[in-house]
Image: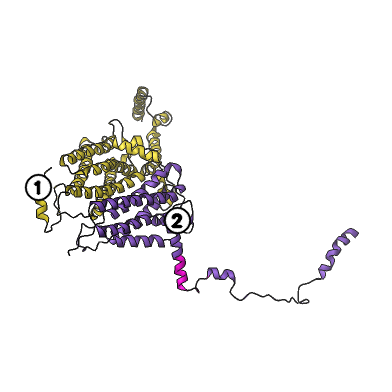
């Protein structure tokens, strides 16, 4: 009994404590009103437009560099975006226009045809690799395939420059070499990113459509031939 | 009353005779006949109805378990359940048909896939268009009037023709064969997926053929047409013969003839459209000189 009383004594006083109207609770709860550091990072509404545009351009440029020098890095995969592929596709499609009239049925690909081949080709290859059991997400795969068109776009620019100068056999050989090199570069760069995500016994099944895709784009670049303009 | 029973016993004796002749025959009804002879036929029908129900779902899907409904991703993943070695084996089998072996039974029965047919069709579209363009260019090299054109519209046309052939003809054939087998629904039928698979792989031989067609030599091109038609036609015929021979002779011959005729039309049509050695280019002011130079270069 005594022990119990002693034991209960430390708590005995507490039974008298009541947090109610007898003892008013006062204090100061102050919330920082000014803009805090973490708030600034999420709200980009107040920054100048130039800053916003430059940030995205820098991200795109960073990925271009990763494509040109393919290393083991996850920059393309982690922060995927589709601005770069769009930019490249539009540039390529514009460069493949040779300004002939629409009635010339035998000409090169129209703007819409290039668009369809690039985007639907990428979507189909992405679906194919996912159906075969790949681990990359849909947009990551689209991002990689789109960015790896960069070498072929550079080759297109080079081809157009070469065609301004001459259009005989020598220029054809030069263009062939340039297009073949950039086709190999594109395929190598994209398989460096894509092949890790596939099971080993199906890797070739995934790489072949990528090879076909860049081969077709390379053929379109190589066979570009503007009509001779009458002087 | 006595005569039906006597008849029944006679039937049983005949059945016993049959059983002793061919002991391997499955005789479900016979095993139950001694106890309840009147119910023998009914029992047989019930069991076979169960089998029919199972066979229906199995037939449509090629006898495989397909995960999920058709709205799930796993359902379509089951169509791509192949390895590199399997695809290569199937391609090899389509190029080297042997008379005793049906392509389907030997290679595809375990797991029909859609990877092969789809990518073979895509490759064929581009190889036809590119080789056709190349053959036009090669046949005009001596002509100073000729200005090279990429002829990109051929890709669209090739895509339409080849995809329609590789997907609509199997649908029609499968529908026709299923209708002919009618109510008997035997296990020997091919599922839709297997039909598409066989047609897709049979088109593989045309890929190297189209590359070789770019050589602008007429007689070589026609020899290639015959060889490739022979190979892929025989793959199709050997595959569909076991199904069709159960039918009446006329229908069997007609079905196989239709398969071969459509295949011939595809091969010859593609050859004539994409690989014209004697050029009939677009009507332009320079067409007359081109004709003259073409006729002087008769190969």
| Rendered location of residue B268, percent (x, y) | 19, 44
Quick one: label 2, few (<14), some, or many (20+) residues within 10 Å? some
Among the chains pictured, the one given yellow colouring is B
| Residue position marked by numbered label 1 in the rendering | B295
Tell which of A148 and A123 is nearer to you. Answer: A148
Magenta highlight range: A43-56
Residue A54 forms part of the magenta stretch: yes
Q: Is residue B188 visible?
A: no
Q: Would residue B166 be visible to someone looking at this image? A: yes
User: Are marks 2 and 1 in one subunit?
Assistant: no
Comparing B14 with A155, the one in front is A155
Residue A150 lies, in percent from the top left, at: 38, 57
Residue depicted at 32% across the width and 36% down the height: B93
Q: Nearer the viewer, residue A116 or B75?
A: A116
Q: Secondary structure at mark 2?
A: helix
In the picture, the quarter occupied by the N terminus of chain B is top left
- Residue named by callout 2: A66
Element class at badge 1:
helix
């Amino acid at each position: 009994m005594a022990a119990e009383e002693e034991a209960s004594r430390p708590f005995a006083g507490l039974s008298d404590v009541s947090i109610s109207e007898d003892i008013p609770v006062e204090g100061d709860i102050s919330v920082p009103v000014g803009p805090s550091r973490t708030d600034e990072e999420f709200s980009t509404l107040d920054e100048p437009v130039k800053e916003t545009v430059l940030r995205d351009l820098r991200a795109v440029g960073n990925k271009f560099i990763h494509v040109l020098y393919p290393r083991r890095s996850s920059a393309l995969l982690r922060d995927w975006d589709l601005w770069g592929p769009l930019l490249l596709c539009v540039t390529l499609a514009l460069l493949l226009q040779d300004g002939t009239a629409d009635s010339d049925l035998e000409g090169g690909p129209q703007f819409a045809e290039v668009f369809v081949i690039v985007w639907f080709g990428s979507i189909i290859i992405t679906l194919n690799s996912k159906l075969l059991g790949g681990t990359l997400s849909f947009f990551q795969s689209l991002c990689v395939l789109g960015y790896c068109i960069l070498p072929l776009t550079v080759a297109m620019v080079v081809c157009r420059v070469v065609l301004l100068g001459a259009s005989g056999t020598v220029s054809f050989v030069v263009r062939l070499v340039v297009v073949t090199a950039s086709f190999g570069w594109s395929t190598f760069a994209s398989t460096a990113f894509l092949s890790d995500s596939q099971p080993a016994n199906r890797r070739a099944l995934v790489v072949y459509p990528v090879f076909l895709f860049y081969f077709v784009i390379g053929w379109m670049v190589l066979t570009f031939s503007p009509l001779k303009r009458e002087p | 009353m006595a005569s039906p029973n006597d008849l029944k016993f006679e039937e049983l004796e005949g059945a016993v005779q049959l059983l002793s002749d061919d002991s391997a025959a499955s005789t479900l009804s016979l095993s139950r006949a001694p106890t309840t002879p009147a119910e023998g036929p009914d029992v047989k029908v019930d069991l076979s109805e169960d089998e029919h129900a199972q066979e229906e779902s199995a037939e449509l899907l090629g006898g495989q378990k397909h995960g999920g409904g058709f709205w799930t991703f796993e359902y379509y993943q089951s169509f791509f359940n192949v390895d590199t070695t399997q695809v290569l084996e199937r391609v090899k089998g389509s190029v080297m048909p042997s008379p005793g072996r049906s392509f389907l039974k030997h290679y595809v029965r375990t797991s029909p896939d859609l990877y092969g047919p789809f990518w073979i069709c895509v490759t064929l579209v581009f190889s036809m268009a590119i080789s056709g363009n190349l053959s036009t260019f090669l046949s005009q090299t001596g002509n100073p009037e000729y200005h090279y054109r990429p002829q990109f519209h051929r890709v669209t046309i090739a895509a339409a023709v080849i995809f329609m052939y590789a997907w609509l003809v199997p649908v029609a054939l499968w529908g026709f064969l299923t209708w002919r087998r009618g109510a008997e629904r035997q296990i020997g039928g091919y599922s839709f997926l297997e039909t598409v698979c066989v047609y897709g792989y049979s088109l593989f031989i045309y890929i190297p053929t189209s590359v070789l067609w770019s050589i602008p030599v007429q007689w070589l091109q026609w020899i290639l047409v015959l060889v490739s038609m022979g190979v892929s036609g025989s793959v199709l015929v050997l595959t569909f013969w076991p199904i069709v021979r159960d039918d009446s002779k006329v229908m069997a011959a007609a079905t196989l003839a239709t398969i071969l005729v459509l295949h011939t039309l595809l091969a010859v049509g593609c050859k004539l459209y994409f690989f014209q050695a004697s050029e009939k280019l677009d009507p332009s002011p320079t067409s007359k000189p081109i004709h003259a130079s073409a006729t002087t270069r008769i190969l």
